[in-house]
Amino acid sequence: MYLIDDCLAWINLQSQILEALGATVERVRPVSITHKDHFVNIARRRASEANEFALKPKNLQLNDKDTAKINGYESDGYHYSSLFPSDCQGGFFADQFENLANFRAHYQGTGPEIWEQTNGKLDAFVAAAGTGGTVAGVSTFLQVRHGTLSSTF
Amino acid sequence: MSHAQQEKNPEIKCFLVDPPGSGLYNKVTRGVMYTKEEAEGKRLKNPFDTITEGIGINRITKNFAMVKLNGAFRGTDREAVEMARLLLTLLLASHFSYF
């Protein structure tokens, strides 16, 4: 299915743009949200690891790869590479599921964009939900701001 | 936005479309977070195989709790692929005159 190839090319391009901007991009396999290695769970873990890393004294800041090297007597003294830079101040997990900045972005951004680009001429809005931020932000904007509020909730 | 436009559209309906394996459809339509793939004795270690990775969930997030919905639909993977193709076709047609 060439559509999938196009999507993969687009995802690669997005990674390259982030890397060009100075970000470290960790590529992961797509797995279920309940899996410990789902990208959201990895992000949560990395933020927590960065906090632990930042609290350690500098000479103890090793990552797993370095530890393996030391056990194999290949340590090169104090010049350890690390997943985190030596000036790492800690990590922050944005948590798109529970963070209401997600809702606000769609209430203040996506909702008004849809309203403007359709000149207010729309009968219905249908969307899927993962975090719920899009459907909640847009539906609240359209119904509270520009229509009568009738909700199943 | 002008009042005239609002009067033309006094009510904009909002709906959820939910993929297989997600409990949100039943939460919206019946008030109970449930999907048959999550039934007792049916739950798999690597839960449910759908191409809509990242869409659908089996808990109420703080973001989803803010939603204002009139109803919900179920959607299949086939429908998701067909709609993605249609949207991509329309996008390419409108932007680049591909077709």
Image (spheres, coloured by chain):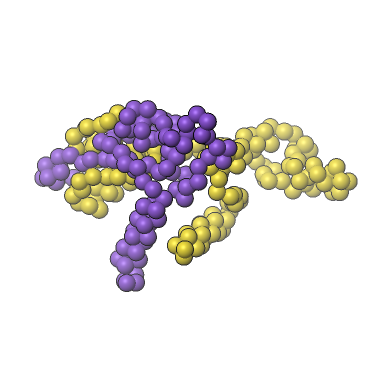
Chain colours: A yellow, B purple
| Label total for image | 0
Closest to the observer, A65 or A108: A65
Q: Position of residue B54 (x, y in %)?
A: 47, 44
- Residue B66, by quadrant, is top left
- Please give the name of the residue rendered at 24% of the width and 47% of the height, measured from the top-left corner: A115
- Please give the name of the residue rendered at 82% of the width and 46% of the height, measured from the top-left corner: A69
Is residue A6 something one can see in this rendering? no
Quadrant that contains the C terminus of chain A: top left
Query: Residue B54 vs residue A135: left or right?
Result: right
Closest to the observer, A36 or A122: A36
Q: Position of residue A12 (x, y in %)?
A: 54, 59
Furthest-right residue in this view: A73
Closest to the observer, A131 or A35: A35
- Please give the name of the residue rendered at 33% of the width and 32% of the height, measured from the top-left corner: B28
Furthest-front residue in this view: B41
Q: Position of residue B15 (x, y in %)?
A: 29, 40
Is residue A19 something one can see in this rendering? yes
Query: Residue A21 vs residue A118: left or right?
Result: right
- Please give the name of the residue rendered at 12% of the width and 45% of the height, measured from the top-left corner: B8
Q: Is residue A121 above or below residue A17?
A: above
Q: Position of residue A127 (x, y in %)?
A: 33, 44
Closest to the observer, B44 or A61: B44
- Residue B97, by quadrant, is bottom left
Query: Residue B94 vs residue A42: left or right?
Result: left
- Residue B3, by quadrant, is top left
